[in-house]
Image (spheres, rainbow, N blue to C red):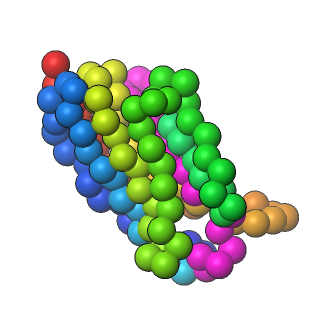
């Protein structure tokens, strides 16, 4: 079992920045991939960024060059630094952890709201 607690969401003007944090607890030694997803009203949940245990990361095309995912293994925390925010970034952002498998169990945080005003 892995528990994930997100923080750092809020309201920001377009062009501004926010940093999301996701603190993991539980069977964290088994976590292989941690990522951030987002879901806007009426839309499907989509991957924003992910980072594997070795440090390699990948991003959605829509956030490349603006968002940075990082991982502090000592604090069992993953961050999402979001710069140059746009109104279309408005969504609920969810932290996700996938364990080494098989099976590759997946866990989700409760979500944090990010609202970007124009």
Residue lying at 36% horizontally and 46% vertically, measured from the top left: 81
Q: Position of residue 62 (x, y in %)?
A: 48, 23
- Tell me if 62 is positioned left or right of 18 in this view: right
Q: Position of residue 47 (x, y in %)?
A: 55, 37
- Figure quadrant of the C terminus: top left
- Tell me if 19 is positioned left or right of 118 in this view: right
Residue lying at 20% horizontally and 45% vertically, measured from the top left: 10
Q: Closest to the observer: 58 or 98?
A: 58
Q: Residue furthest right?
A: 102
Q: Is residue 111 above or below residue 44?
A: below
Residue lying at 46% horizontally and 61% vertically, measured from the top left: 78
Q: Is residue 28 magenta?
A: yes
Q: Position of residue 65 (x, y in %)?
A: 45, 30
Residue lying at 29% horizontally and 29% vertically, measured from the top left: 84
Q: Is residue 4 visible?
A: no
- Figure quadrant of the N terminus: bottom right
Q: Is residue 62 visible?
A: yes
Image label count: 0
Q: Position of residue 103 (x, y in %)?
A: 81, 63
Q: Is residue 118 above or below residue 110?
A: above
Residue 113 is drawn in which quadrant? top left
Residue 61 is drawn in which quadrant? top right
Q: Is residue 49 magenta?
A: no
Residue stretch in magenta: 27-46
Q: Is residue 17 above or below residue 95?
A: above
Q: Closest to the observer: 113 or 63?
A: 63
- Tell me if 37 is positioned left or right of 82 in this view: right
């Amino acid at each position: 079992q892995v528990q994930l607690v997100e923080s750092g969401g809020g309201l920001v003007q377009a062009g501004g920045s926010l940093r999301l944090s996701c603190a993991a607890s539980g069977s964290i030694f088994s976590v292989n991939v941690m990522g951030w997803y987002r879901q806007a009203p009426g839309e499907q949940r989509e991957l924003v960024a992910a980072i594997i245990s070795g440090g390699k990361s990948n991003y959605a095309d829509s956030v490349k060059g603006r968002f940075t995912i990082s991982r502090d293994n000592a604090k069992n925390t993953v961050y999402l630094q979001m710069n140059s925010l746009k109104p279309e970034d408005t969504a609920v952002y969810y932290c996700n952890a996938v364990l080494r498998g098989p099976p590759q169990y997946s866990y989700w945080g409760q979500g944090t709201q990010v609202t970007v005003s124009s």
